[in-house]
Amino acid sequence: MDFQVVVLAGGTSKNLVPLVSKEVPKALLPVGNRPVISYVLELLELSNLKDLIVVVEGQDAAVRVGSWISGAYVDRLHVEVAAVPEDVGTAGALRAIAHHLTAKDILVVSGDIVSDVPLGAVAAAHRRHDAVVTAMLCSAPVSGPSESGSSVGKDKAKKPGHYNIIGLDPTKQFLVYIAAGAELEKDIRIQKSILRAVGQMEIRSDLMDAHLYAFKRSVLHEVLDQKDTFQSLKQDVLPYLVRCQLSSEVLLNGAPQTEENGNEKASSQNNQLMLSQILANSSTPSFHELYALGPNGSTPVRRTHKCCVYIAGKSKYCVRLNSIQAFSDINRDVIGDASHLSGYSFSAQNNIIHPSAELGSKTTVGPHCMLGEGSQMGDKCSVKRSVIGRHCRIGSNVKVVNSVVMNHVTIGDGCSIQNSIICSNVQLQDRVVLKDCQVGAGFVVTAGSECKGEALAKKEK
């Protein structure tokens, strides 16, 4: 398809502390006992998109991610890993590797997406419309977006309700308005010029920008070059391109002219003409097919600058691992309702217990659970709706519910773990009780401790 693919894999995202660390960058966080980035890489491979640049924030993180990819995907994908400075933002990351981008179109994918939406369909929609950008939208999670807070530990204090307000043309093919992270309680102000240009608009707050975009490379380069303060694709670049398409005149190279021309009376009359044209011509596929007003409200010029959307079907799964709550939710989903994404075949008991794992007497592993390679459990243990990683040593009379336990974790006798995340190499001594907690890598929780809603971690050196 002649698409170059850029996977933005992030670094050690601050809102995922203590799950991430220098040793475990975001891209390598486990989802169903395999790194989250593997879900995107396999989705790309399925769509026959195999020429990738994976962008990682920070040199150390890039080395770790690169060595994992080269081991796991040797002979399957052609991957170049590029390190960029930390905290440059998504637009800054693309700006830093712009000289590597040579194809006509660029597919930019967030490395934290877990999805079954066919990426080839997004690329095909982009080509079909000859768009400057095509954004993938999917149904927002029922509980609200991940920024709306969480039931895990310290996330509870976050403020509720930031949503994407998205305006679509009547055919639902073109993006005509976007306000990322808007608060629904407040009035939404939409400029008259936008309504004049589109005639009719459908406002949606139930769709999520999946952070998956196809860009026309020439326009992307130009915007990144001219707008050197732009840091975010979602907050800066996409809204800018959407605004540009509604300018009165768009140059073929994608740079807009100013919208207002001062000749309000003539302009207004012509707008009436254009609106009546929209209403009369119901067979017109979209507002992009109509003539726009010329710079002085006079000679019309055809629009050349299209911002399109690909809306994933409601039955599709698409969630980003961008918060601690999302980490828990996605792990639960890939061993539950979205088990087709896990890459494993489930047993008759609807769980996955690795053949090398050992269970003591009267120990039960319920449905929607995963027990990794080489892990051992003592007697009279109970595991419900949880993922347990590789080579864990779990004592007797241990209860694990709604939790994620990573690799090489030691859990003493009589422990109870509920709604918690235990990172790799953690040691829980006997009779520890954890509820709604996150325990960072290598931490030791002393015998008899009872913790609720806490983040326990070593201090980073």
Image (tube, rainbow, N blue to C red):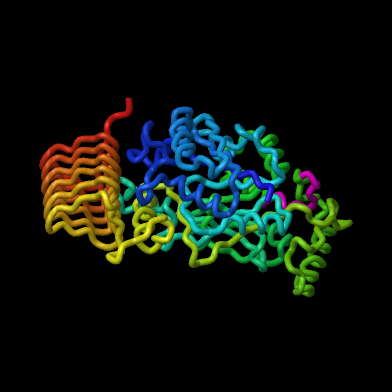
Instruction: State left or right for residue 384 relative to residue 110.
Output: left
Query: Does the stretch in magenta take in 292?
Result: no
Of residues 211 and 165, which is closer to you in this image? Answer: 211
- The residue lying at 26 percent from left, 42 percent from top is 391
Per the picture, the main secondary structure of the magenta-coloured stretch is: loop
All told, the count of numbered labels is: 0
Q: Can you give x and y, in whole percent of width and height, for residue 55 in the image? A: 54, 37
Is residue 236 in view?
A: no
Of residues 77 and 122, which is closer to you in this image? Answer: 77
Q: Can you give x and y, in whole percent of width and height, for residue 276 in the image? A: 79, 71
Q: Can you give x and y, in whole percent of width and height, for residue 329 in the image? A: 36, 55
Query: Does the stretch in magenta take in 243?
Result: yes
Instruction: State left or right for residue 253 relative to residue 55.
Output: right
- The residue lying at 46 percent from left, 47 percent from top is 38
For the C terminus, the quadrant is top left
The boundaries of the magenta stretch are 242-253
- The residue lying at 14 percent from left, 49 percent from top is 378
Q: Can you give x and y, in whole percent of width and height, for residue 6 in the image? A: 58, 42
Is 323 rendered above or below residue 195? above
- The residue lying at 78 percent from left, 63 percent from top is 289
Q: Residue furthest right?
A: 299
Is residue 180 in view?
A: yes
